[in-house]
Image (spheres, grey):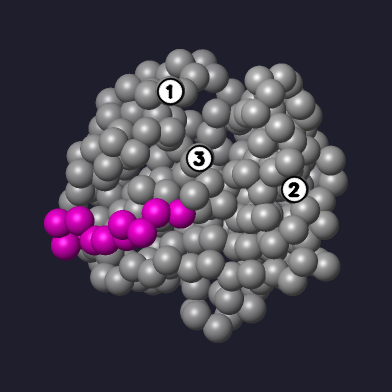
Amino acid sequence: MNILCIGDVVGKPGRKAIEALLAPFVKARGVDAVIANCENAAAGSGLTEPLFSKLRHHGVDAVTLGDHVYRKRDVYPLLEESDRVVRPANLPERAIGRPVSLLDVGGVKVAFFCLLGQIYMKQANSPFAAADAILGQLPPDVKVSVVDVHAEATSEKVALGHYLTGRASIVFGTHTHIATADECILGGHTAYITDVGMTGPYDSVLGRDKKAVVESMVTGMPFPFDVAERDARLSGLLVSVDPATGAAQSIERIQLRLPDEAGQSEVGHESA
């Protein structure tokens, strides 16, 4: 079973990259399931139901989110109703959305969930305890599990990778938007990478207009951080998993580039 995990989809450039590049890659490489972090899909912050539907149409099978999970209020019904999208599992129990879901991939059940880091992030419960609770309640016939660790600190991501070794099939990091070169298979079982990278405009500072971000850092003044426009790329991690055991067999970093003319962006911003 080939599973593609896609990093933070940022704004219209990221969505355009998905639209143009995903289906051909899935066909060429025999991808069976696509799981994408889409918490930055709506103008760089949050997700909406119409955008979720478009991403699904273009080949995304399941969606994970992160610290911007509730940025768009119109996503709440989607979080309550859809089994193709999960909110961070270590939010309070009463938070809207599913902490974990099962994806049927050719008759094989694949569990997927995401965890928020605690270091330099918004307040959340222990991601270690949340992972224990979810993995402990999965039915015995669910051998394949995919975990998105949406965290700032590399140390916390690496620690979670080791903590979940032998218990999860894939642990992929998101949030920092910069791909790391440490992909590996831990303990002969768990595919791991600290950050899979951003699917969005790379002529930028983490997907935002580079001039505005630099000016803000130089002057110490707030500027609107509009979503950048150029050099859109799709970044992901392709993992081959044995469906009988849940063990990862191979791992490969993926980055595909979209021609600039196809990656123009709408304006969406946050203040510095």
Label whose residue precedes the other's in the sequence (1 or 3): 1
Total marks drawn? Answer: 3
Question: Which residue shows up at 26% across the image and 70% down it?
Answer: 249
Packing grade of label 1 (10 A; few <14, some 14-19, many >=20) is few
Question: Which residue shows up at 79% across the image and 45% down it?
Answer: 50
Q: Is residue 210 left or right of residue 173?
A: right
Residue on which the image places disc 1? 120
Residue on which the image places disc 3? 175
Q: Is residue 42 visible?
A: no
Screen quadrant of the C terminus? top right
Q: Secondary structure at mark 3?
A: loop
For the record, the magenta segment spans 179-189
Q: Amino acid at mark 3?
A: His
Above or below — where is 7 with respect to 220? below
- Which one is nearer the viewer's eye here, 143 or 235? 235
Q: Is residue 26 left or right of residue 248?
A: right
Q: Residue 217, position in %: x, y?
A: 63, 28
Screen quadrant of the N terminus? bottom left
The mark lying in front, picked from 1 and 2, is 2
